[in-house]
Amino acid sequence: MTTPETPNGVVHRNIKTPQSEEISGPAAGSRNNVPDEDLRQWQKHAQRVKEKVLEQVQVQLSDLLDQALTETVESFTQTQPTFNGKTTKKSAPRSQRTDDGKVFVARPSLLDELFEINHIRTIYHMFIAVLLMFCLSTLAVDYIDQGRIVLEFDLLFFAFGKMGTVIWAWAVMFFYTLLVPYLTLVIWGSLYHTCPSKLGLSLGTGLILSAVQTYVLGLFPIFVVVQYQLPPASRFIVILEQIRFLMKSYSFIRETGPVIMRNTPKEGESPRFPSLSSYLYFLFCPTLIYRESYPRNTHIRWKYVGITTGMIFGCLFYAYFILVRLCVPVFRPETKEPFTKRTMVLAVFHSILPGIMLLLLCFFAFLHCWLNLFGELLRFADRMFYKDWWNSTSFANYYRTWNVVVHDWLYQYGYRDFLWLSKRKFRTAAMLSVFIVSAVVHEYALAMGFGFFYPVMFFLFAIFGVVFNFAMNDKRQSPVFNVVMWASLFLGQGVQVCLYSQEWYAQIHCPRTENSFWEIVTPRSWSCSYQR
């Protein structure tokens, strides 16, 4: 019969001999402490070994699961549906199949999974409690000031005013995006394989479509926003839909054009085109990457639709109370107060709380609720609209995981196409170009939405964002860098809320006296002192 082995030294020190039993006094007590000290050291060493083993097992298990998922997706996509529902075998080697672009897989949103955990759901309940406190504080202040309960939403009604203009402008952009790019693709594809000058036909068609796109999806929304003097929220609806239609139509042409060029029809057959119904579905489904088909759910969960719709309205009222209770009283002062360093610093730090709350609300309302609402109504199964960006220890990972929908488009048609044109020689330049394009589009949306030019977002995104992206890269894994990331987000949101709020009221009380270039690009808040 054998006994389990124990660490060397421990067994021999614990064996009692007759001589040791007869020894007493301080010397014996000192020797009795030796086994306890060695045992503690051994336990600490075993704990460290256990942690290392568990970490290695976790990493290896994660790699195995990722590999299994990749192989499963690859085997599934070996028979891809093409135009008119027909399937074609993919004969490309495995190394090329993994680089064909985004693969859509049925999966739920991360927050939907996390809300199944009681601890995470409690945090969600805490935010609801804060919303209730905002409502109660507003009712209490109104009752004290006016002697009655007044729950007005004048700011909300003002922000979403002139919705009739927004609806018909959206309808024009929608029907144009639905019909013109699709018909252009059909006409071009019908002539491509029979035309003697394929390059001339493609260049001519591309130039004509680009000119029409510039006029209808480029200038028309700007004309509507400026000419009809739309309020802020209505402006953002028109401008964001303009950007969405441009990105979707580009993806449709970019994905279907090369397929038509590669698939030469047989004699007597006409080229195969994507169906109009699949393109119509793409215009509404929550993705910017076109595919002929997507993974679909079997049914619509109407209870989920109702709850998600309620959460969207809750986020709107939440943002309203944040602006009314935390921003308007600060940036609409009762006395003259010129622009000084002291007022600037105090205003920035006061804006950190409403700024980060508005950031979280925008993320939850749009990236989770709004996209999941359309995904559920359209039975769109791939709900990975974001990842766990809140756990990021680097800004590089934060930019990849914050908005997966837009990141996929920028990576697919910006970063990868740049590398293809440069033969994979200028990766840094490709990354910088994507940052610059994203910063310009963000600043364009804010400038058109607010009605003034104040490039705060551009400088934070294109300058500080680029620096942080390279300084805090994926090699930073310490939890300290997660604290740094959150602190940077707090400060950045405070700066944006402060400067944009100051400029909003400065534009109202110190309007431009002329329309010169410098008058337009110079912020009014730098020199404006006003009294309410």
Image (spheres, grey):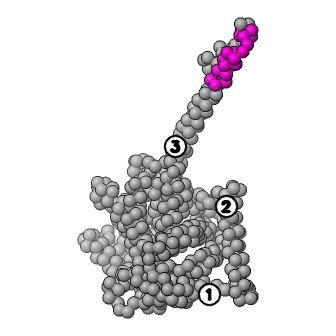
Q: Is residue 31 magenta?
A: yes
Percent position (x, y) of residue 406? 47, 66
What's drawn in magenta, residue-wise? Answer: 20-39
What's the CA distance linking mark 2 and mark 3? 31 Å
Which residue is labeled 3 in the image? 63
Percent position (x, y) of residue 7? 62, 20
Crowdedness of circle 3 by 10 Å Cα count: few (<14), some, many (20+)?
few
Which residue is labeled 1 in the image? 154
Q: Is residue 134 magenta?
A: no
Number of marks: 3
Q: Is residue 87 among what the camera can see?
A: no
Q: Secondary structure at mark 3?
A: helix
Q: Amino acid at mark 3?
A: Asp
Residue 123 circle label: 2
What's the CA distance linking mark 2 and mark 1? 30 Å
Residue at 41% across, 66% down:
461
Q: Going by the image, does 158 lie left or right of 88?
A: right
Image position of 479 with respect to 209: above or below: above
